[in-house]
Image (cartoon, rainbow, N blue to C red):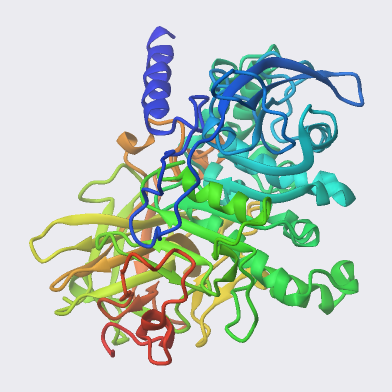
Amino acid sequence: MKSNIARRTRALLSAAALYGGALGMVWAPAASAQAQTPWPGGTWTPEAASYGTAQDLQQSVTMDDGVVLKADISYPTNPATGARAPGPFPVLFTLTPYLGTSAKQGDYFVQRGYIFITGYIRGTNASGGNFGFFSDRDAKDGAELVQWAATKVQNSNGTVGLWGGSYGGLDQIYTVAALGPNSSLVKAMTPSCFGAEFYRETYFDGGIPTATEQFPLHFQQLMGGTTTAAYGNAMYNDIAAGGEKAYDLNFWQTRTPGNYVKQMVEADIPMLIWSSNLDIYARSSLEFYAYLQNAYARGNTHKDDDADDGSRSEHIKAIYGPMQRNKPVTPRYQIIISQGGHCAGEDQAIQLEWFDTWVKGIKTGMDQTQRPIHVHEVISNNWFNTTYYPVVPTYTQYFLNALGQLSTANKKDNTQDTIAWGQPGPNTTVQYDGPVLPTGGTLAGPISASVFASSTTANLELIATVELVKADGTVTSLSHGAVLSSLSANVEDRLWSDDNGTPVRPYGAYNHDSFVTAGKVQEYDWAMQPIFAQIPPGGKLRLVFTTQTPTSKCQSILGTDACYPTTPQNATLGGGMFTIYHHTEEGSSSINLPLLPANCWQTTATASDPYWANDSIVHGANAPCQMGKTAQNP
């Protein structure tokens, strides 16, 4: 028992160092007198700090059910006298459960003319009530706190902006949904390190629990409260045993942020999403952006939303499908993808510009862009702006061939590879190398795998990893994703395909097990993490299949790799041998890539080009990244 506790404590400390924002450390993006983000950070310079700060700590706010929540308030002060500045000022509000959150985390904004309020979720810290992990009651609390901040807090001018990352980013979505008609109080929001999915990306990969499954065991350590430990233990135990929470049923569906896109667009609140390429929401943050733009283009809602016929399916496809290039976009919804892990890279100067634009009405130019996606490309470290997601209209399929090769030519043969279920090793790993790209290439967006396979048991687990192999032999992992055959069914009206019908982003149902017949060959389409990455000249891509994630990658308490199969999953996978068929009568196995020419995202890269500039070099009529040209056929 002591060894388990020690192991979990080491994992907690390790994760805390990597993921401070999610684990109750002070989540505070880099504040600066001038935006520190490299191009296209732009030339806009935040106003100089003109106020001091003072805090009123642990203020009591009574909810409509009598439960008292706590909040810290940071006010602007006269720097010469220390007296509270008369204002009035707009309010920035964040809602968090974590111990150790500093009341001064928003002082960068306070020094520039905002009141900053940190509210503490019921059942955590010193707030009363029972913990609910993003419950409906928590959402209602968020809405009540926003109304209190707008109408009751001294020197408030009645307008509110929402700020925060991780738990505090997710909270913003539920709060706005609960506000309903009162959402007009909120003038802007900046949810960071959050995404459209809880089940499909953060807690499960292909229906298999990720390292994040361990997170609930630490609720009490991270959040305090008298009910968090029992809640977290029960949640963990139910998932591990293969209970209801191991499937995408009501518990997760009511907590899936993407299900609230309709309410977000109805509220018409400008939203700046900030994510990163290794975030635990890297995939679904981009999807949330696409959903927002789709809902905007559709004109918000239709009467047929809940119709029990084909019109509802068409509505779902319109909102939750890939963005269409003939549809308008709005600068009210933008996303920045920086580099790093969970809650890495956020810059308060850029967030200040967002609030100054939409809350204070300052003409920054941020509201003029038609390129609302801003990405810091991996490997090249270049920034670029674009509009539609997915980026690539026509995908490149690399087919599996004999002798461990990948090829764009679908050379049909009868070859196959068999691997055992177990930790990566000689009998549990198979790899395929793509062709060398003499001039390099560009990956831009979601990746998927389409594989024909069979199992000797009633279940199958395959993990696909895409790696970059540079000319000097250096290997960098770029993307991964897992499939479990019993949970491999996809929701057809949520499937993303390219212009040729190639799967781009499958969307698993994960609502019940459907076990396979031993030896039966079946096609599996599954989603992998998106990536925006340069392939240097002489580099190539490698596809690796394994059947388990290395134990060493599962030591943290946050992560997106398939780490801990449930008890029923282990029972049906144990001893399994899985065969990958390169070609069958029904089709061929492939990895489906958003592969574009080298140096695809050329930019002007001058100091006068901010994030939201419309880059004619990237987006001209012949821009290769927008034309669907491939690295093989530029």
* Residue name at image x 23 percent, y 46 percent: 425
Q: Is residue 139 visible?
A: no
Percent coordinates x, y for residue 124 in the rendering: 67, 19
Q: Is residue 528 left or right of residue 143?
A: left
Q: Quadrant of the C terminus?
A: bottom left
Q: Is 455 on the left or on the right of 71, as rendered?
A: left
Q: Which residue does the image show at 63% across and 53% down from the upper left?
A: 510
Residue 20 spot, x, y in % from top left: 45, 30
Q: Is residue 250 left or right of residue 486?
A: right
Above-or-below relation of 385 to 91:
below
**If the image is split into quadrants, where does the N terminus sit?**
top left
One can see residue 466 in this view: yes
Front one among 583 and 285: 285
Picture quadrant where residue 494 is located: bottom right
- Give the residue at the far left of this rendering: 472
In this view, the residue in front, 295 or 333, is 333
Tag count in the figure? 0
- Please state the horizontal and vertical placement of residue 244, each as a whole percent of the image: 70, 39
Q: Residue at x 39, y 70 (%)?
A: 444
Q: Is residue 459 left or right of residue 359?
A: left
The foreground one among 115 and 128 is 115
| Residue 409 higher or lower than 364, as above or below | below
To which quarter of the image does residue 541 belong? Answer: bottom left
Of residues 622 and 558, the one nearer the viewer is 622
**Residue found 44% across the figure and 82% down from its top:** 587
Q: Position of residue 99 (x, y in %)?
A: 57, 18
Q: Of all residues shown, which one is farthest toward the front?
A: 80
Q: Residue furthest top?
A: 2
